[in-house]
Image (cartoon, grey):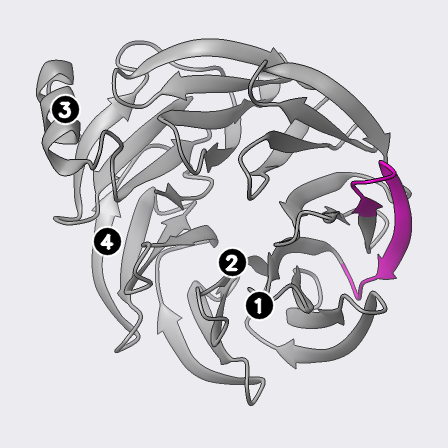
Amino acid sequence: MQQTLQPLLFVALLATACSPAFCQPFAYVPNEKDGTVTVIDTSTDTVVNRLPAKGRLGKKIQAAAIHPSNQKLYVVVRDKNAVAVIDVVHGKQTALIKVGDEPEGIDISPDGKLLAACLEEENAVSLVDLQSHQLKHTIATQGRNPEHCIFSPDQQWLLASNEESNDVDVINLNTLKSEHVIAATKHPRGIGFSPDGKWAYVANEAASLLEIVSTADWKVHANIKVGLRSNGVKVNGDGSRIYVSNGGDHNISVIDTASRQVVATIAVGQRPWNMALTPDGKKLYVANGRSNSVSVIDTQTNLRLKDIAVGNLPWGVVIH
């Protein structure tokens, strides 16, 4: 059983660990089947809380995103076709935003003003204004069953991977239209951008490879063979490393972007998926869906430091 701090003690911990008033860095792990979020203190790699403090967010939760500058965590509640807004300091849900039919992946824009949600059954992406929590736009995708959404670093584009049509929509956020479709190899899932926005990296689960897409022409320029059933992608802060989770091989591929070669393979738990890095880039946290755990990796040595027990079927990790 997870040991968690009492709510008042956790609030006190945040007050002492945060500057000026916002926690850094805590890891938030949405547990799909529990409908809860496990909170990990990354300074000690221990579980310190559970969100919400009582009950659950829904019957099935999936992606999560943390706002870059406030105390709000956003979590997909799939069975409610909504995104829950959680005050992480007090452990309370403060809002529920209806976004559309069957949301799965979400992302927050770099300026913190918009939230994008991929709507699998609508073949669309919705955009939510995070100041008002109002749904502002629903944009049709050209592909089918969009799953993962990600904003480009310059916030001009939104990419959505379409698992059924094996392609990636490129949405222009100025025109609010899908202007390009990138043909993927087979079953694209996680996406990451290089920090300069010149490259997008797309994991293809059924092909077990990572595709490298130029944002100059939105075409695949290269691919890298990784592990079985590759799904999650995380790029480090300086763009020198790409981490790809391989759900079938239970490991992480570490790619050097200069050579475009796999330079390390790190064993983790069963069915690793979405990942997060600490702000200093020194540790990688990997959600192991079928092991009900999060693996902690030292990114300087590429060694697994610890496995942390979380809830049932962790979907991913976000850190801020």
Where residue 133 appears, as percent x and y from the top left, is: 59, 15
Say which amino acid is labelled 1.
Answer: Leu
What residue is pinned by disc 3?
Answer: 10
- Quadrant that contains the N terminus: top left
Nearer to the camera, 181 or 33: 181
Say which amino acid is labelled 2.
Answer: Gly
What residue is pinned by disc 4?
Answer: 307
> Do residues under tags 1 and 2 come within 8 Å of each other at their CB atoms?
yes
Whether residue 185 is in magenta: the answer is yes
Say which amino acid is labelled 4.
Answer: Asp
| Sequence order check, earlier mark of 1 and 4 | 1
Is disc 3 placed on a helix, strand or loop? helix
Is disc 2 placed on a helix, strand or loop? loop
What residue is pinned by disc 1?
Answer: 228
Say which amino acid is labelled 3.
Answer: Phe
| Sequence order check, earlier mark of 2 and 3 | 3
